[in-house]
Image: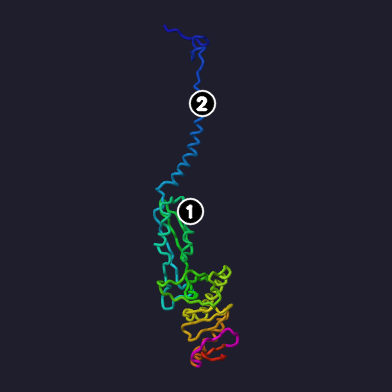
Amino acid sequence: MTPTLKRGTRDNVVPFRHRGKAVRYRRRHPLVRLLRPFVGAVLLVGLPVGLGIWLLTTPRLALAAVTVDAEPSVLGTTLRPSHQHAPVRVRRVSGAWVQRIMRPLLGTNLLRLNLDQVSRTFDEHPWVQSVEARKELPHRLRLRIVERSAAALLHDGEQLLYVDPNGAVIAPLGSNDPAADLVVLSMLSGFGHDTEPSAEAIAARERALRGALSLVSELAGVRPDWAERISEIELMGMDDYRLSVATIPFPLLVRAGTLHERIRRLEALVPQIAARYGAVDAVDLRFARRIIVQPTGSATSMRS
């Protein structure tokens, strides 16, 4: 017969430990406690730094190709050639030239490449107006080149210089340049012909050339066919110009801001002047109430 245990007696207490035996705790080594934050710092800081160093030095991101998107310049933006259906488009910044100046940069890490420095590299080319550079990982650089446009030719001594719509000189006319019907601008001797002009002289010349180009637009508002056939504009002084038009048998002396009224008065007189006087040096339209005809070889001017 199995004996039964009664509640409240010492016999039903289950001993869970031996009395008098101390519990042992396992302590970590001090070196382990010091290394744990160090390893955390390495993982938090060292990995990004190492990744950055690898990205800036790996040959996988080296510049290997340059792609050029160029906008060709438009010759004759102010004067459109009358015998052509579209302006003459010429590429002035060749792909070979771009590849030559970009060759020293090949192999450079693309992430470390300074785009501002790349843009400044093109400052030596006179036809470059602006450059937009964009990186295309892993190894390509894309350039968008905007070329300057020529609006006229400046007759400077023995050479012709391209001039942009703002009156700034671009570059000399080359012997192999394609033919384009651009108006020729001439300046009186001593005006803007210094060997090394100062900044003030260059600014004054650009203002004068802009005034001559605006005269073309002014004439186009009255007689577009005459404006398209202007061959030369001579700058005589402040707002005074000498126009040579292919469709008119004599030059015109005009003043800026007065063409709308005075060209209208001249239109009907052109055939009569040519028939009556024959060769004419010039017709002066600078005066408000009269047109002065200067016949060739005559000491006096005929007025009407």
Residue that carries the numbered disc 2 in the rendered image = 30
Q: Nearer the viewer, mark 2 or mark 1?
A: 1
Residue 279, given in percent of the width and then of the height, sits at 49, 90
Q: Nearer the viewer, residue 298 or 75?
A: 298
Label 2 to label 1, Cα distance in Å? 49 Å
User: Furthest-right residue in view?
Assistant: 288
Residue that carries the numbered disc 1 in the rendered image = 114
Q: Residue 286 colored magenta? A: yes
Residue 176, given in percent of the width and then of the height, sits at 40, 72
Is residue 242 shown above or below 40? below
- Label 1 SS: loop
Q: Do the residues labelled 2 and 1 touch (CB within 8 Å)?
A: no
Instruction: Give the amino acid at mark 2.
Output: Pro
In this picture, which residue range is highlighted in magenta? 276-290
Q: Residue 163 colored magenta? A: no
Instruction: Give the amino acid at mark 1.
Output: Asn
Crowd band around label 1 with a 10 angstrom C-alpha radius: few (<14), some (14–19), many (20+): few
Tell me the residue at 54%/85% (across/down). Answer: 264
Q: Which of 186 and 270 is in front in this view?
A: 186
Q: Nearer the viewer, residue 272 or 241?
A: 241
Please give the label number shown on residue 266: none
Left or right of 258? Residue 46 is: left
User: Furthest-bottom residue in view?
Assistant: 276
